[in-house]
Image: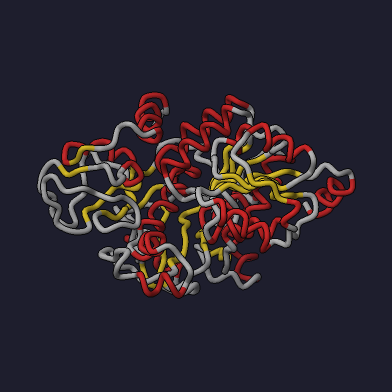
Amino acid sequence: MNRELIGLAKQEKAIKVAIVGTGKMGRGLVIQLSRIKGMLPQLVINRNGEKALNSLLKAGVRKDEIVVTNSLTKLNSALEKGKFVVSEDMDLAAKANTIHAIVDATGVPEVGAKLALVAIENRKHIIMLNVEADSVIGPILYKYAKEAGVIYTGTAGDEPGAVMELYDFAKRLGFEVLAMGKGKNNPLDVEANPDSVQEDAFKKALNPRMLTGFIDGTNTMIEMTCIANATGFIPDIRGGHGIDSNIEDLVDFFKLKEEGGILNSYQVVDYVRGIAPGVFLIFTTDLEDIHDQLRYLNMGEGPNYVLYRPYHLTSLETPNSIFEACLNHKPTIAPTKGLVADTIAIAKKDLKAGERLDGIGGFTVYGSIEKYKVAKEENLVPIGLIDEKAKALKAIKKGQAITYDMIELNTSTEIYRLRKLQEKIIDV
C-alpha cells in the first residue's frame, strides 16, 4: 500500500478524499491523511464549518490553500486547482467532480443513510465510520453499491473491521471459526445518560451522547450487529454474554455448555470485559497433526485456540479502507450476509404514554443485540430508527424491549424508508 501510494504521489494521481464529520474521529482522520503520500483530505465537510476548517489547519494546511464555500461550482473549481475545500453542505461530497471516496464520520444514523445513498447514486466509494447507520440499513446500501459498481464498506480500525481481519486470516488458512468479538472499553451501565457522563465526556473531549452510547453498551451492540451481518454469526443470547475474562481463559469460556463453557452454539459473536481495546477470535481444526503443530507453537493445549489483536486505532486506520476501496475495489467489512442480527431498543427508564424518545446515547433507550429472525417475530424496533420525534403510545416499563406498536416513529426519514424497503427485498 505504501509503495503504491508513493507511486501515485509521484505521478500526481493522489486519491482524493472527502471527510464528512469532524468530531474526534473525523478530525483525527483529516490530520492523519495529511501525513500519507498519495492521499489527500481535499474536501472536509461539517455542519459547523469552523470545525472543518480547524481540522485542516491542524493538519498543517495553510489558510490561503483552503476555500470555504457551499457552492458546487466554486467547490469544483477550487478542487480542480488543487485547493482544499471546506463546506457545510453534506451533499457536495458526492457531487464533487474530482473526489474518489467519501468517509462518513458523523455517527448519526439519518445522516449516514442520506450520505451513503447520494454517494452511491453519484458513483463514489463510501467508507462508513457510521456503524449506527450500517447496523440498520447496511444490507440494502451494500446491494445498491454493488449494483452501481462502487464499494460500500465499514472501516479498518473500528472493532468490526479489526475482528474481520482475524476472521479473514483464519478462514484463509482453512481453520474453523467458532466465536469472535470485541473487548469493551468502558464499564457497562445501561442507565447512563448525557448528564451522568458529562464530566467524564468533558475530560475525554467527547460529545456526552457519544460517551453515553459507549457506556450503556449500545455502541458495542451495534458493532456486534455489523460483525454478524458480515459473517453470518449470531448472538448466542440477547445482549451477548459479556463475560469478564483475560486472554488465556477465553478458550475455556467460549466452549459449548456440554464442554464446560457458556455457549449454546458455535459461530457466535460476543463481547468481553477485560481484554479491551482488543478484538478476539476462537478457532479450531479437525486435524490432529495441526493440533500438534499449534501446541508446538505455544497456541495452547486445544482443541480451541484464540487469535487476539490487542489494539484498534479507529479512524487512524481508515486510510487502509480507502486504499482497498479505491485501488483494489474491495470492502474491509460489509454486510454481505444480509439481515442476521439487529440492535433492538430497550427502555432505559419507565416511559409514559405521550413521552418523547431520544435515540442512541440519550436518556430514554439503549441498544441490545438480537437475532434478526427473533426481532422480526417479536416486532422489535431497531434503535437506529428512534430519534427525538419518536413518541411512546403507551406506558413502557424500564428494561422492556420496544415493539413497533408501542411507539410512533418518525416515518419521514430516509433511514426509515430504506429500512422498510430493505425488509422487503433482502433475503434473511
Q: Is residue 3 visible?
A: yes
Q: Indicate the quadrant containing the C terminus: top left, top right, bottom left or bottom right.
A: top left
Here the colouring is: secondary structure
Determine the residue positioned at 13% across, 41% down. Answer: 393
Residue 368, given in percent of the width and then of the height, sits at 31, 53
Q: Is residue 176 visible?
A: no
Residue 142, given in percent of the width and then of the height, sits at 52, 34
**Up/down of 260 relative to 26, above or below:** below
Front residue of this view, candidates 287 and 92: 92
**In the image: residue 39, left or right of residue 256:** right
Q: How many marks?
A: 0
Determine the residue positioned at 62% across, 35% down. Answer: 71
**In the image: residue 20, left or right of residue 76:** left
Which image quarter: residue 404?
Answer: top left
**Up/down of 63 relative to 334, above or below:** below
Most distant residue in the right direction: 10
Determine the residue positioned at 45% across, 35% down. Answer: 338
Determine the residue positioned at 44% across, 50% down. Answer: 267
Residue 265, given in percent of the width and then of the height, sits at 36, 52
**In the image: residue 353, left or right of residue 245:** left
Front residue of this view, candidates 384 and 53: 53
Residue 408, given in percent of the width and then of the height, sits at 21, 37
**Up/down of 412 relative to 221, above or below:** above
